[in-house]
């Protein structure tokens, strides 16, 4: 069994506690020992990495991954690439995320049903490099809602979403996604600012449809993600047993109470970077005026109010910002740590917990496996950072600052061993 000894690191263990100096021994794919007194563990038979006080932390989890989105400016970018080219693109993005310190990617949805599945399988079989992947499905939506871009005179089958109506069609679609290997089923429960016919505060998908999706996915041992912005949509998802809720800009007291009741069961990714980048960094694709006309500024404000409230109620937030658009590139995902501090009132240490411990708990939900902390018995996904992410989380965005990236006990990158 391979052994790696990391000596003299400044260990941020992912619990939110202050970092401390220590050594970490990795055997096989697991953290075997963590010692607060540096220099005590024998180096015999180990590859030794001298950390020289660098910041050791758990690998990060992207909680809303779109591995098949790269430089997207319109839904055509999801539909038009042939599956062969699109698979290669997905593989490149997956490799990029690992290079950027994301040892896990929780698939939100992919542009074609099996893109995440194929790349996950290739990584798991050792054919290519990439994070641990929970493969997202194609989005499932209902007639007239987000993702249904057909019109009576222009049917356009094969849009960016599978369109179902009623619980029975939902059951069939979810079973199909399960059969094809998807780990996470994505439902478009609420509307969206990019679909004027169903704005963000609308809820076109019904409780019965969502409940059917959840029951069917769970029967296969899979999980359900929901795109949800409306108050009603959040309530529907929480009552129906959805596992991961995205966006969630609008709430009321009843919805907040439902979130709090479900806080040991659900994970929430606010995807704040999409609004931030649409408002301030989307030129020339979208001007600030157009973003405001789409009420992105209002959505960002609502997001701030809701997620500050959810933070206070102990909801497990994960970072994950809908990266993959031309204004929010896949690879810059660690910006979310800073956005959590800027918009949601988190301390940097707490935001790092969202990026690591919460993400690891999400990836292993429903299993006995342990991921996301630097503690004995946990899977060995680790980063060494030349810099202090607690003082300045932006150091995590530049891969040059990541001197070691370990996934599942294997060194993906090691710039320290001479
Ligand atoms: Zn998304």
Image (spheres, helix red, strand yellow):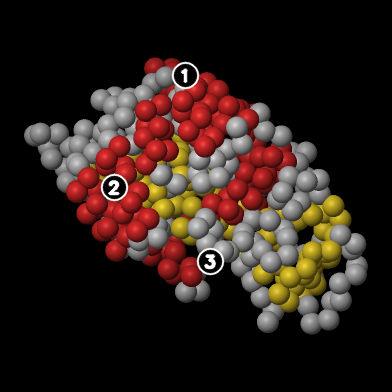
Question: Circle 3 sits in a helix, a strand or a loop, which is it?
Answer: loop
Foreground of the two, 107 or 97: 107
Q: Residues within 10 Å of mark 2 (few under 14, many from 20)?
A: many
| Mark 3 burial class by Cα count in 10 Å: few <14, some 14-19, many 20+ | many
Q: Which of marks 2 and 3 is in front?
A: 2
Q: Position of residue 36 (x, y in %)?
A: 86, 59
Which of the two marks, 2 or 1, is nearer to us in this view? 2
Residue nearer the viewer, 198 or 196:
198
Q: To which residue does mark 1 refer?
A: 298
The label shown at residue 212 is: 2
To which residue does mark 3 refer? 129
Disc 2 and disc 3: Cα gap in Å?
Answer: 36 Å
Quarter of the picture for ligand 1?
top left
Where does the C terminus fall, quadrant-wise? bottom right
Pointers 3 and 1 in contact (C-beta within 8 Å): no
Please, is residue 202 above or below residue 128 in the view? above
Local secondary structure at mark 1: helix
In the rendered structure, which disc, 2 or 1, sits on the residue that comes first in sequence?
2
Q: Is residue 42 visible?
A: yes
């Amino acid at each position: 069994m391979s052994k790696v000894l990391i000596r003299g690191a400044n260990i941020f263990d992912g619990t939110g506690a202050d970092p401390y100096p220590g050594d970490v021994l990795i055997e096989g794919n697991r953290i075997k020992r963590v010692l607060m007194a540096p220099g005590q563990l024998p180096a015999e038979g180990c590859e030794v990495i001298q950390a020289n006080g660098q910041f050791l932390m758990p690998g990060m989890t992207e909680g809303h991954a779109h591995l098949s989105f790269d430089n997207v400016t319109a839904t055509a970018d999801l539909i038009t690439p042939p599956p062969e080219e699109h698979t290669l693109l997905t593989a490149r993005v997956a490799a990029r995320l690992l290079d950027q310190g994301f040892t896990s990617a929780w698939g939100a949805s992919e542009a074609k049903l099996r893109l995440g599945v194929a790349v996950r399988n290739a990584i798991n079989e050792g054919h290519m490099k990439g994070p641990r992947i929970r493969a997202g499905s194609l989005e499932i939506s209902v007639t007239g809602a987000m993702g249904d871009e057909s019109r009576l005179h222009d049917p356009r089958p094969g849009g960016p979403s599978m369109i179902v109506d009623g619980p029975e069609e939902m059951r069939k679609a979810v079973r199909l996604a399960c059969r094809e290997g998807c780990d996470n089923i994505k439902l478009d429960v609420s509307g969206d600012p990019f679909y004027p016919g169903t704005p963000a505060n609308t809820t076109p998908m019904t409780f019965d449809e969502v409940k059917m999706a959840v029951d069917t996915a769970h029967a296969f041992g899979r999980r359900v993600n929901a795109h949800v912005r409306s108050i009603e949509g959040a309530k529907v998802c929480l009552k129906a047993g959805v596992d991961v809720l995205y966006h969630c800009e609008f709430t009321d007291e009843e919805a907040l109470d439902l979130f709090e009741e479900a806080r040991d069961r659900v994970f929430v990714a606010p995807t704040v970077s999409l609004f931030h980048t649409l408002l301030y960094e989307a030129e020339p694709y979208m001007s600030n005026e157009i973003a405001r006309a789409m009420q992105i500024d209002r959505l960002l404000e609502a997001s701030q109010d809701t997620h500050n409230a959810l933070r206070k109620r102990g909801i497990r937030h994960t970072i994950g910002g809908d990266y993959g658009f031309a204004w929010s590139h896949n690879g810059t995902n660690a910006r979310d740590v800073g956005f959590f501090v800027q918009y949601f009132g988190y301390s940097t240490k707490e935001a790092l917990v969202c990026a690591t411990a919460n993400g690891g708990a999400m990836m292993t939900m429903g299993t006995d496996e342990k991921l996301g902390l630097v503690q004995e018995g946990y899977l060995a996904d680790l980063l060494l950072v030349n810099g202090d992410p607690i003082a300045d989380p932006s150091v995590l965005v530049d891969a040059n600052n990541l001197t070691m990236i370990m996934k599942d006990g294997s060194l993906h990158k090691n710039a320290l061993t001479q």
